[in-house]
Image (spheres, grey):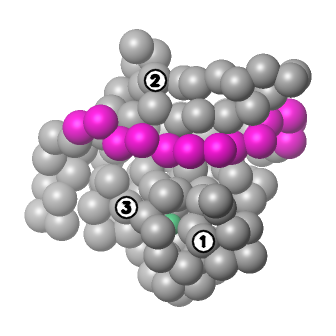
Amino acid sequence: MLNKTTDCPCGSSKNYDDCCAPFHAGKEFAKTAEQLMRSRYSAYALKQIDYLFETTHPDKRDDNFKTEMAAWANRAEFTKLEILSKRQGRSLDKIGKVEFIAYYHQFGEDKQMHEISRFKRFKGKWHYFDGEIE
Ligand SMILES: [Zn+2]
């Protein structure tokens, strides 16, 4: 059972403060694409829209980004993240891919999103670039 005050929503089984909180606060930066993926999932769960904006590659941010993200995140309750596979995205790589299933609850239904996300570095830091829905 998820303890919302302590367990990190990304499913690492660590405390939020020891897991994604330093990323959301801008105190630390994700070292791997998977770490960024997890921290973005927990940012959705905790409606940290600014973090989602900051960690999206600048080429992929449009004017309505924050409004659309907020609207989507506010309509969903995020329940679980499952990482299926990853390619590259390590500390010395410049690109990476992470395949995942995000589970969420929306409009009274349990839903899931299966995506392969692409991550790229921008100014040395990992950013979400785009994704293919499976
Ligand atoms: Zn986390």
- Residue 94, given in percent of the width and then of the height, sits at 19, 52
Please report the residue visible at 22 percent of the width from the left and 41 percent of the height from the top: 86
Q: Quadrant of the C terminus?
A: top left
Query: Which callout, 3 or 1, points to the residue nearer the camera?
Result: 1
State the residue position of label 3: 35
Q: Which residue is mark 1?
A: 7
Q: Residue at x 30, y 69 (%)?
A: 31
Q: Quadrant of residue 22?
A: bottom right
How dense is the environment of label 1, judged by Cα within 10 Å: few (below 14), some, or many (20 and up)? some
Three-letter residue code for mark 2? His
> SS of the residue at dot 3?
helix
Instruction: Estimate the spatial distance between the alpha carbons at disc 1 and disc 2, rounded to whole Å.
Output: 23 Å
Do tag 1 and tag 2 residues touch (Cβ < 8 Å)? no
Q: In the image, what residue type sits under mark 3?
A: Gln
Q: Which residue is mark 2?
A: 114
What secondary structure prevails in the magenta region? strand
- Furthest-top residue in view? 134
- Choose between 42 and 56: the one closer to the eye: 42
Discs 1/2, front = 1
Does the magenta-highlighted stretch encompass residue 79? yes
Residues tagged 3 and 1 counted as in contact (Cβ below 8 A): no
Q: Which residues are magenta?
A: 71-85
Q: Secondary structure at mark 2?
A: strand
Q: Is 41 one of the magenta-colored residues?
A: no
Q: CA distance from mark 3 to mark 2?
A: 18 Å
- Asked if one can make out residue 26 in the rendered structure from this viewpoint, the answer is no
Image quadrant occupied by the N terminus: bottom right
**Mark before the other along the chain sequence, 3 or 2:** 3
Query: Residue 112: image x %, image y %?
Result: 58, 24
Apparent side of residue 63 relative to residue 24 in the rendered image (left or right): right
Residue 100, position as x, y percentages in the image: 39, 35
Q: Which residue reaches farthest front?
A: 1
